[in-house]
Amino acid sequence: MDLLNAIVVLLNFVVIPAASYGAQLALGALGVTLIYGILRFSNFAHGDTMAFGTAIVILVTWAMQAAGIGLGPLPTALLALPFGIAATAALVLATDRVVYRFYRRQKAAPVILVIVSMGVMFVMNGVTRFMIGVDEIRFEDGARFLINATEFRKMTGLKEGLAFKTSQALTIVTAVIVVAALFWFLNRTRTGKSMRAYSDNEDLALLSGINPERVVAVTWIIAAGLAVIAGTLYGLDKAFKPFNYFQLLLPVFASAIVGGLGNPLGAIAGGFLIAFSEVGLTYAWKKVATYVLPESLAPDGLLQILSTDYKFAVSFALLVVVLLFKPTGLFKGKAV
Amino acid sequence: MSSTQNPWQEDRGNKDRSITRPGGSEIIDPETGHEAHPAPGTPFLLAENMTGGYGAADILHGCTLKVEKGQIAVIVGPNGAGKSTAMKAVFGMLKLRQGRVVLDGKDITHLSPQDRVAHGMGFVPQVNNVFPSMSVEENLEMGAFLRRDDFRETMEQVYDLFPVLKEKRRQPAGELSGGQRQQVAVGRALMTRPKLLMLDEPTAGVSPIVMDELFDRIIEVARTGISILMVEQNARQALEIADMGYVLVQGANRYTGTGQELLADPEVRRTFLGG
Ligand SMILES: Nc1ncnc2c1ncn2[C@@H]1O[C@H](COP(=O)(O)OP(=O)(O)OP(=O)(O)O)[C@@H](O)[C@H]1O
Ligand SMILES: [Mg+2]
């Protein structure tokens, strides 16, 4: 039995990847949940909003690299992030102006808005592919590893190596900062409180003199910011490919719904729950088991519950289970 | 699905978007002039000959309500008489086909509810009158949303009026008891420092003791010079504290008089006060 090596393997293949994936999902789910809380519909275009914003970030990154601007060990994409957020915020505000506002004025039912957002999704989808193509793009630069597996082995003398990528560390740190800033904004500022009031009781918010169009605009800007940050972090960690971002919609929505739609805390919890379930169920536990169990009990199989091809099924299954037993999500959200 | 006139909307409920009804925000009515001084003898609030409803059919038929400065006016009547509708009409949430609303000598018939708040009206709706997930203190802050000055003093006054709210100020309003929630709702409306406070059944669903307590508080508010227009189910108790009473039936004034007059009127007693 070799507990130390088991822990290192666990950290390396499950905890660290799932934590950074969870942070990315949480940021995406926060955007979905904010839109749902304020505008009262599920925004299917969120995945493609992430893709659009990340595409802009990549284009600006390339321009900066060409001009010799960089951040040293950190990825240049961080410098490009504000440009991506600005462009995406402009895009969603323009979309709101020409598309969503019309339906809002009609007091359209949420289900109509959902379908409208699918239309928006297809348009954004096309725009992004036009801009940057459909291929996989890697745009991470700077130092790739914070802790390198070989060095770790040399340093500790353990058999197993531990790799901690810069992008993973960056994801977790950024997520913490962004979430703290968002909660501070929602709970401490006049505008943030007016957003919560509007989400709580629209009529009373209007009676209190809260301007709905302003609340909606601020919500779109924040959602765009969250989407671009989530998309860029995901792209740095894995790679950018428009289709993958479209596919991210499922785990992102699952996170938001499992946590309780409209509840920001729930979105974060949901993101990590989905990420850890996905990674945990598709990981081959053989190596960990070999270290932990006595030799006589050593497993023959891979101890992998699901093939990685089924990782999206995990989100789906979790979603269905939660909806069956707790329709408002784990945290008190709005019923779907 | 109901047969609705709005094809865009099936299940969203009746969100009163009329609250920000566009086009209704001229400040001064050209006909009634721009001078804001009430003519002598004009009540503080005059809602005259109001006729209108939510759709094709009228709910209100020439309903008239008056409130004098610092006095309490109470509307009573059977369920579905249009009491809440009359309140909404006074507050501008309903498009009137006829009639006018004059506040402090100013014709506000064409103002949106938000603008009426800025002109000194405070409204506590019958239902959904707090922000349930926000703390008591945040509810009060939202009441003062339109104010740009320091509103801490007003908040202290509200806490003086309802001491229990100060105790619970960090608690979400949705977790309070019915009576406490009504206090939050009234407190929220007081935060704009209204000149006219409109309450739609403030004592709905509270125990008799709490009801007496709430009525005492309302009298206290009126003593500070705020006029009060109130709908009440507890007709007898409400008329006892009322300077003016209106019995509304099918959207029209049936009986009007001071609270004592209505209480003494055998006809009113027999039909509306249960003997
Ligand atoms: N939002 C609405 N849309 C359409 N009709 C409505 C709406 N609200 C009320 N009504 C109708 O208007 C009439 C008067 O309702 P209102 O709520 O004003 O009565 P009320 O006197 O306040 O009754 P209660 O004592 O039960 O509160 C009722 O026939 C009701 O069906
Ligand atoms: Mg009513």
Image: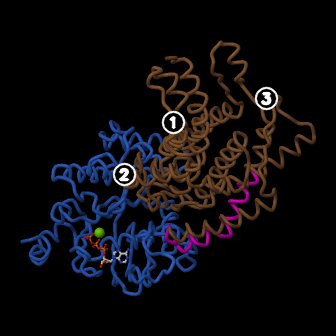
Chain colours: A brown, B blue
The image shows residue B262 at horizontal and vertical percentages of 17, 71
Same chain for the residues under marks 2 and 3 in the image: yes
Left or right of A172 on screen, residue A313? left
Instruction: Say if A57 sits above or below B110 in the image.
Output: above
The amino acid at mark 2 is Lys
Mark-to-mark CA distance, 1 and 2: 35 Å
The residue that disc 1 covers is A301
Stretch in magenta: A86-110
Pick whichever, A58 or A283, lies toward us. Answer: A283
Q: Is any atom of residue A335 visible in this view?
A: yes
Image quarter for ligand 1 equals bottom left
Left or right of B96 on screen, residue B22? right
Q: Residue at x 66, y 30 (%)?
A: A169
Left or right of B121 on screen, residue B199? left
Pick whichever, A137 or B262, lies toward us. Answer: A137
Secondary element under disc 1, as helix, strand or loop, is loop
Q: Residue at x 20, y 62 (%)?
A: B238
Instruction: Say if A167 sits above or below A112 in the image.
Output: above
Of labels 1 and 2, earlier in sequence is 1
Q: How many numbered discs?
A: 3
Chain letter behind tag 3: A
The amino acid at mark 1 is Gly
Of labels 3 and 1, earlier in sequence is 3
Mark 2: give few (<14), some (14-19) or many (20+) Cα within 10 Å: some
Mark-to-mark CA distance, 2 and 3: 44 Å
Q: Are marks 3 and 1 in contact (CB under 8 Å)?
A: no
The residue that disc 2 covers is A326
Chain letter behind tag 1: A
- Quadrant in which the N terminus of chain B is drawn: bottom left
